[in-house]
Amino acid sequence: MNNFSFRCPTRIVFGKDTIAKVAENIRDFGGSRVLMVYGGGSIKRNGVYETVTASMKEAGIYYVELPGVQPNPRLSLVLRGIEVFRAEKLDFILAVGGGSVIDTCKAISFGLAVPEGKDIWDDYFMVAGAPIPRGPLLGTVLTLPATGSEMSNSCVISNEKTNVKRGVNHENNYPAFSITDPQVCFTLPPFQTACGNVDMFSHLMERYFTNTPDVALTDALLEASMRVIVQYGPMAYRNPTDYACRENLMLASTLAHNNLFGCGRVQDWASHWLEHELSGEYDIAHGAGLAIMIPAWMKYVWKTNEKRFAQFATNIMGSRVPVSETERLVMDGITRFEDWCHSMGLVTRLSDAGITDKDFELMATRMLTGGRVFAGHFKELYHEDIVNIYRLAL
Ligand code: NZQ
Ligand code: ZN
């Protein structure tokens, strides 16, 4: 295991009927004038909007609304949010939605602290490892377990002018609190449930595929979490109001990406970079893109560490192929992952998503800009490797 330092300051308020506690939590963190950010209207249809605004009104909290966050959240709305926050002299940001809404809020927060003369996109999103300034605090009411953004240090934004989608990771991105009530998942469309399941699985997988030795404890935590998602994911897809499934998946989403299970391990993240290019270029859902890129990445890199891939197939995907038949075992593990995605209505090929090879070179070139030399750590991937993986995914 490697040395590490770990800090994750987000308060999680979990369980049934916890959304009404939003005002109490805002007050706990000193908020009284709130920018409330949400998406295209799902929260108005499922009652979450009503509960959140009633709680703030009752507590005498002033709030201004910023609706309209789109999936694959756009830089333009971040800039608009910064303007509104300043004009209204607000002091707290509240995200009510999925990862796209939360990431918009994270970017608004640190965007407010960007020093004069610096640009939020060019000097932060496009500079690998740029230190993120600390902005106003934000809280979240999560409505879609998937990204783990409710307790992660990541913020992923798309620049609609360049089709570039980039993430920044920094301690200053953590929300102060996140309210996670599994009942909100009852109104999720099956497609979003499926995408969320693949995304939370992928955050564990990106940490699991490592060459760091002696990581038995985090291996066990990662494997157990992935097995639960493999089991409960399709159940929630088929039966959206199964609370037992929803609560386990909601907690899995949070634990998958708060990095506790990644401590002491070199992590991979190539599948995410491959996917971010796809959703930047084609505006597809992140989880849907991962269902395509993960199997292709696996087929390309498995020989780097056959033992780990055999362990994945046996301990997580439930393959019974004997370890002595390594290649057959590894391929069975990958096929089982693909079958799992198919069981939730997702495709695992670019051609099935209507994507051809015309932008592979462009996406590979764009991925390795802004100080990036290669993608991934399990196996370092350069331009040619990246194009080869996109080809394998066709
Ligand atoms: O916009 P509304 O009307 O709210 O509808 C949303 C949206 O259409 C809908 N939805 C959300 N909760 C719902 C609901 N519909 C009915 N009932 C509910 N309870 O779902 C749709 C998708 O929402 P979105 O927020 O885009 O999905 P997700 O949470 O998957 O977020 C995806 C974004 O997060 C990034 C992805 O790349 C993508 O841009 N990621 C962020 C990460 C992070 N910050 O830590 C890590 C991830 O790896 C990921 O890259
Ligand atoms: Zn993800």
Image (tube, helix red, strand yellow):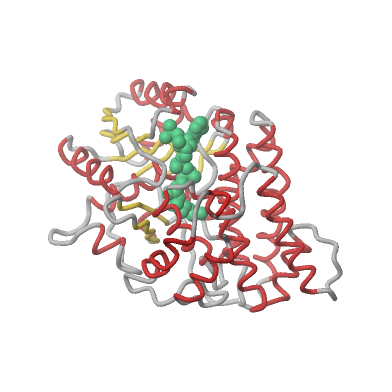
Residue nearest the observer in this picture, 323 or 94 = 323
State left or right for residue 67 relative to residue 220. Answer: left
Asked if residue 75 shows in the view, the reply is: yes
Q: Quadrant of the C terminus?
A: bottom right
Residue nearest the observer in this picture, 234 or 112 = 234
Residue located 53% across and 71% down the image:
388
Q: Is residue 171 above or below residue 17?
A: below
Residue located 36% across and 20% down the image:
58
Residue located 81% across and 60% down the image:
319
Which residue is outermost to the left? 117
Q: Is residue 275 above or below residue 328?
A: above
Asked if residue 4 shows in the view, the reply is: no
Residue located 57% across and 72% down the image:
265
Q: Is residue 66 above or below residue 215?
A: above
State left or right for residue 380 relative to residue 68. Answer: right
Residue nearest the observer in this picture, 180 or 71 = 71
Q: Quadrant of the N terminus?
A: bottom right
The spot of residue 301 in percent (x, y) is 61, 73
The spot of residue 4 in percent (x, y) is 51, 72
Residue nearest the observer in this picture, 366 or 146 = 366
The spot of residue 209 in percent (x, y) is 62, 69
The spot of residue 55 in percent (x, y) is 40, 24
Question: How many numbered marks are there?
Answer: 0
